[in-house]
Each structure stands twice: as C-alpha cells, then as structure tokens.
Image (cartoon, coloured by chain):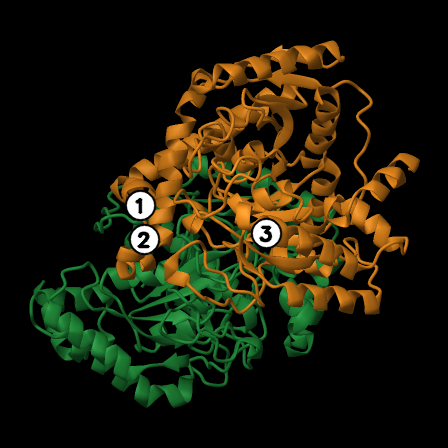
Chain colours: A orange, B green
Amino acid sequence: MNTGTAKRSTKSPHEWTALEIVNAISDGRVSRETVVRSCLERIASREPHVLAWEHLDAQHAIAQARALDRSGSSAALQGVPFGVKDIIDTEDMPTEYGSPIYAGHRPARDAACVALTRRAGGILLGKTVTAEFAVMHPGKTRNPLDATRTPGGSSSGSAAAVADYMVPLALGTQTTGSTIKPASFCGVFGYRPTFGDIRCSGVMESSGSCDTVGLYARTVEDISLHRDILVGRAPEALPETTVAPRIGFCRTPQWPRLDPSNQHLLEEAASRLAMAGAKVTNVDLPPDFARAEEEHKLLSSYEFALNFADEIDHHWNQLSPTLRDGKIKVGRECSYERYRAACEFAQHCRAALSRVFEQYDVLLAAAAVGEAPVGMYTGDSSLCSSWTLMHVPTMSIPVFKGPNGLPVGAQVLAKSNDDRNLFAVARWIYQRLT
Amino acid sequence: MNTGTAKRSTKSPHEWTALEIVNAISDGRVSRETVVRSCLERIASREPHVLAWEHLDAQHAIAQARALDRSGSSAALQGVPFGVKDIIDTEDMPTEYGSPIYAGHRPARDAACVALTRRAGGILLGKTVTAEFAVMHPGKTRNPLDATRTPGGSSSGSAAAVADYMVPLALGTQTTGSTIKPASFCGVFGYRPTFGDIRCSGVMESSGSCDTVGLYARTVEDISLHRDILVGRAPEALPETTVAPRIGFCRTPQWPRLDPSNQHLLEEAASRLAMAGAKVTNVDLPPDFARAEEEHKLLSSYEFALNFADEIDHHWNQLSPTLRDGKIKVGRECSYERYRAACEFAQHCRAALSRVFEQYDVLLAAAAVGEAPVGMYTGDSSLCSSWTLMHVPTMSIPVFKGPNGLPVGAQVLAKSNDDRNLFAVARWIYQRLT
C-alpha cells in the first residue's frame, strides 16, 4: 500500500491504472475532473504523433466528470476515463465504423458495453480509430512506440491509446486477431473473452459466430474489473494463484511463421516458467487444428459477406479494395455447404480442445509473429484466428521485447468460461517473466 | 400445372403465394407493379380492422416495382412484396422497435435479412407492428380472423399481414415464442431457423443466446425459398418425402397447460399420421427438460437487462410496466453465476436433445395452448421457449381449428441444421392433416 502511494505520488493521473484512479477518487485524493483533464492533456500532447482518436470530445468529458464529482457516485469505476473503438455505437458521439459510408453517422443508443461501463462510472473520452468495419484496411493510427510502425488492427486506436497513457481502459473487438495482435504490438494487456460472455448488442456485426468485444488495460486487475462490470458481476479481486499452474506450451501449426527471435523468446519463457515452479509441458494440438486458420477465414468471410449485403449492393465504390478483394471476395466465393462444413469443423475442434484443457490451466502461445511491422498494414493475424474460432478466452500479456526493443506479447489461453482463472494465471506468468 | 393456372386465374395477386408471384412475373403474365398494387389495395381495405402496419410507404413500393419492371431483374424473388417486423432495421423507413423511445428513428442501413431479401428482388412494403422490443407489451394489431383477439406476439404485424393476404412473405424474430405463437394464432406457416443460421445483423438484440430471425408465409415452399435466400444458398425446390417419416410425438412438460381441445387435436393428429404411414411414437424428453422453461426465462432476461442498459438508465419512464416489472426485473435479480448455470444447463440439454433426434426425423408438439385468446395479451409462450433454448429449427403449421373455428398450429421440430428436412417433413404432415 505504501509502495502504491509512493508510486502514485510520482505519476500523473493519466499514468495511473483504472484501480489506482478508483482508489484515489474513493479516498478523496483527486477529483474526477483532475483525472479527466490529465488524460486530455496527455492526448493533446501526444495525439499529433499517435492519431489514436477518431472523435474526441474534451468539453463533454469534463462536463461528465464535473457532474460525477458533484453527485459523488460510488459506482465501481468512480470516474475512470475510457475510449471506445469506433465500431461500437455511442449515443452522444459519431460512430463511423472506419468507413466513409458512415461519415458523421450518429447511432440512437449506446452499445451495451458502453452503457454498462458508463453505468459503473466510466467517463467516455472519445472514439478510437478502427480499421474499416473492423477488418484489415487500416486507419490513421501509428504505433506509439515507433511512429513508422503499425499499432496493429483492427482495434488500432484503443490499443495505442492505452499503451500511450491516454486512457487506462478501452474497448475493442475481435473477430480474427483484432484485440490480441494490437495488444502485442503496443505492449498492453488485451483480453478476448469467452465467446458470448460479453454482450455484443450495439457492436457492428462482422461475423456473429466469431465476434466478441475485447478489452485493453495496462494491468490484469484492470481487465478483470472491467470484465466484471460488462458481464454483470459484482467486481471482485482476483484470487491469488497459490498452486503453480499447469501450462501447456503450444507452438501451434503457425510456429514456422514466427520470427526466430519470437520463437526464442517463447521457448525461453517456457523454461523460465518451469524454473519458477509451473508444470510446463509441450502440447501438440490434434492434427485437425492445422485447418482451423483456413476454416476461420471461410466462416468469418461468409458471414461478413451476408452481413454487409447493404454496403455491397449500394456502396460498393466506398468499400476499400482490400475489403472487396479480400474478405468479401472470399465470402462470396464460398458456398453455403462449404460454410456449414466450416461450422461443423469448428464445433468438432471446440470439443477436442476442451479435452486438451483437461490437463492444463492455461496454454501459452505466440500472440503475433513478432514486433509490429513497419508500415500501416495491420499485421498477420494467423496466431489468433484459430483460437478465435475455438471460442476460448485469451489474453496477450506484454512480457517480451523484440530485436528492435519493441514489445511482443505472449498469448495465454484458458478453456471456455474459465476467464477469471485465465486472469489469475496470466498475472502469475506476468509477474515471473517481467 | 393446369390446376395452378386455373387457381391463379380465380385469385387476385395479393392472394398468390410468393412462388406463384415469381412464376407469374417470370412468365410475363403480370407486372410487379400490378402485384404490389394488389397487395396495397388489400392493405387499404383491411388495415383499419387488422392494424398490422407501423409504417407503410405505398408510393415508395410502387416506385420500386416500376423500377424492377423496367430493369427486368431475374433475381429469385422477382418482385415479391414483403413486410418486416419493426424490430429489424431498414435504411429507407423508420424503425421504432415498438417503443416510444425510438419514435421516428431512422437506421443508417438495412439489416442483413432485409438487404438480402431486396437483393433477391423482394419489394419492401413497410414495417409491421412488434411488441415493445420484441418482448410482451403488445402493439395495436388485431387477429385478422377475430378482431377481439390477439394475433399473438411479438411478431404480431408480420403474422397478421401474411394471414390476411396483405403480403406473401414477412420477417419476424423469435427469442421466446415470437414467431411460432403468432403463426399458430393467425393460421400461417411460421419458421424459426436453427440458431445462428440466418444473420441477425441489424436486428435489435434481445437475448443474443436465443434470438433468431423468423419467417412467415402461407406455404412451406415459400418459407424454404426465403430461407435459401437468407442463408446464401441458391434456391432449390424441396425434396419429396418418399419414405414415411419417423415422428416423435412429444407432449412436453407443458402438456397439462394445453386446452383439452388442443390436446385432443394433437392426439388425433398423431393417430392420423400413423394411419398415413408415419412411424409415430411417444417421446418422453429427459427429466431435465422440465426446467428448460425457467432456465430460458432467466437466461434471456439476464441478457436483455444487460443489452438494454441504455434504455434502463436513461429512458426508464418510457419503458412499459410490463417490461420493467417482467423481463427487466427478472434479469436484474438474476446473478451472473445463476445466469452461467442456465447457460450450462442449455448446453447440456442441447446435447441430450441431439441424442433424442437420432431416432426421429421430426418431433411433433403443441405450438400454443390453444386458440388466440380474447384481448391484446400476446399469449402464453411456454410451448415455445424450451425449444428456443435448444437452438433447434421449428415450424408452426396451420393444421387445426379450435372450438371457436379459429386456427391452431402444430409445431414440428427437427435437429439443428436439419432445416430443409424439417420443411420436407412438415409439408408431408401438412398434406395429410388438411
């Protein structure tokens, strides 16, 4: 506690975690307005370099903070500022889905995840940059650690804003690797929940069989707090991991695509965790899993092409060539029967994976092929898409530095609906690798 | 074929099925404008009694029909008029979700199911009345067969419009019994697909774990055609059922709640189907199924209360007491842990039901407790909610007349993703009971 107080005194509020903000406001050590202004000042100084925000409403945020300061709410987030990916509807801000088709669009209501965060006292600062319709065509955001590199996508702005200390919490989404990959590239915690656990109402559907909301923060505890709020649980501290966890080290069929440096980092991490007391064993997934990446691509593209029938038929010229020649083309060339086969495959693999998890608390895997690449390409999602199809909860934890000194995440996965155990073990791993 | 032509010549276009319209337009026997005008004339004469429509745009519909007549589209629906439940977004018409909160609301895009029906040549006449947020608080629609009675809900207007020959096709939704029950009360075919098979993008989410789009038509063949379009299949005629089907007669734990007259109709139907050659046997569901109705209620209410956080927090006084004291109260009083238990229960029962289906092509069950009740109460959904939770495809077929001469449906169910077989067997059953 003393340590916490001492650390806080040397940091500005924009550098605090969500829990530190909650505690400081609860204790009367800071006003919500001070916290919000600190974040806004950080954004003012850094946004020209990072370009994380599609829409920012400083005066509105300050007004909300003042109102909360006056009313003295005791909700769980107290007044924590947050950002929202611009694929998620907000009642009081434009929502443009990363597409010129929706320039200036104003939804009629908040998405469930936004309304619930606000109910808990979250103060929405603005909308963060998304790739077009949360797929691949990038927005303007740069990696805050190296402006020549991508922050990853599609939740580009949310990951960058949290990494750059603009907000302690941000909402993203994941259909392929859109939460985990940017977390890895920007050096923050990114969490993709068990499929179906956080309501997607008000989030533009990309592929209903794969979409989830995703969360960003700079600590596991903040992720856990935000997740409790979104699923409707009373916030509860994570249990301590007292027994060393059983970790399955899983190279996955995509292993050869990893940068050798990242292979080395993961191998070394597995050894260090074993030395720290974890029971670490190599896991070979059932052979079928080699097909999961391709099946995910067909399934998600098929659903996307149906979901975007309106845009395809009436706004074709406003869709990016990346989207038209990629996801839409794949989706339209896939037959219904082939799509159904992909759905059946996914169900079969989910059952097989749940049997794998009988022997492990978590699996440890790569989150990305390596550091964020130079350029605006949102990066290779192949380390994420198979897991996404499996519906299991997953987290990227910022534990590595690549050859250029840039962050690389490790991906930690648990069985479906074991999200709190995932958090507890991810924290155990994080503490031992950093 | 001669019979078909002869029958067509004695009927007005608004009385035709979707397939009859498609054939007549394809053959050049009628223009799309003539068909649309016939439906609009029917609506003009009957709407004061039925009140099926929340929004109707006659001039817009005629303009679309003329444009299609000029362009000579050869898409599968050619120019078939259709209606859309006002819980489903439309780009060119208001979408009010049955709530004063959204009076005059204009969505930015068509829901996927609307855009795909239009792509296939469907002509949207207007938006049909829905209960508030597709739950229970009724809209203005009356049963077209007896104006003192409910059409059922929540897809009230879509079922009534199809039953009253205003449109041959209409879109609804089902989270509890919102497609099947109105189909039974109004005497039309209502179809609730395998969960997840028809994209819900652009349909306001009630409970993401239970919601599906629902379809209405006056023949099985029309339902099958519309379903092919919505899932992205090339339209294909149904296979003939050459082998007599294996039918499980399933009284379900709700049997004692049925009107005795409806019990009698179902018993008699089972006997007649057996005499017609079907292998009919009684099915007792595993004992757990007795809990499915209550588990569905908790699960769907929990998700609803999260999804409608915005309305609960900012528009409480504009929500109906029915909704506030019903679904929202139940949802808010349910803990996350209890909700998760309901999810686990549902998964367990789905697996058990798939084993039951190893012995049957379809199950035969009640669609409603009896005829549509007098008054506006949308009716008892307890014959549907357990099946909804099971994610299996189901259809109400209009085969019975109750003690007041009003329609009562039989519910036919198949295993998940066996929707086309469901249609084929439902047709076989329909032909033998009518």
Residue beneath disc 1: A328
Q: Residue at x 71, y 51 (%)?
A: A229
The residue lying toward the viewer, choosing from B203 and B270, is: B203
Q: Are marks 2 and 3 in contact (CB under 8 Å)?
A: no
Do dots 2 and 3 share one subunit?
yes
Q: Earlier in the sequence, mark 2 or mark 1?
A: 2
Q: Residue at x 31, y 89 (%)?
A: B45
Image quarter of residue B326: bottom right
Q: Looking at the picture, does residue A279 appear above or below residue B206?
A: above
Q: Looking at the picture, does residue B183 appear above or below residue A142?
A: below
User: Any mark on residue A199, and which?
Assistant: 3
From mark 2 to mark 3, how far is it between C-alphas?
27 Å
Instruction: Point out residue B287 in the picture as x, y percentages from the top left corner.
Output: 64, 42
Give, as a three-letter code, the residue at label 3. Arg
Q: Quadrant of the N terminus of chain A?
A: top right
Q: Residue at x 11, y 72 (%)?
A: B70
Instruction: Point out residue B130 in the picture as x, y percentages from the top left corner.
Output: 49, 73
Residue sitting at the far right = A2
Q: Is residue B251 visible?
A: no
Instruction: Point out residue B250 in the picture as x, y percentages from the top left corner.
Output: 51, 49
Q: Earlier in the sequence, mark 1 or mark 3?
A: 3
> Which element type, helix, strand or loop, lies under badge 2?
loop
Do dots 2 and 1 share one subunit?
yes
Q: Looking at the picture, does residue B360 appear above or below residue B17?
A: above
On screen, residue A203 versus residue B24, left or right, reads right
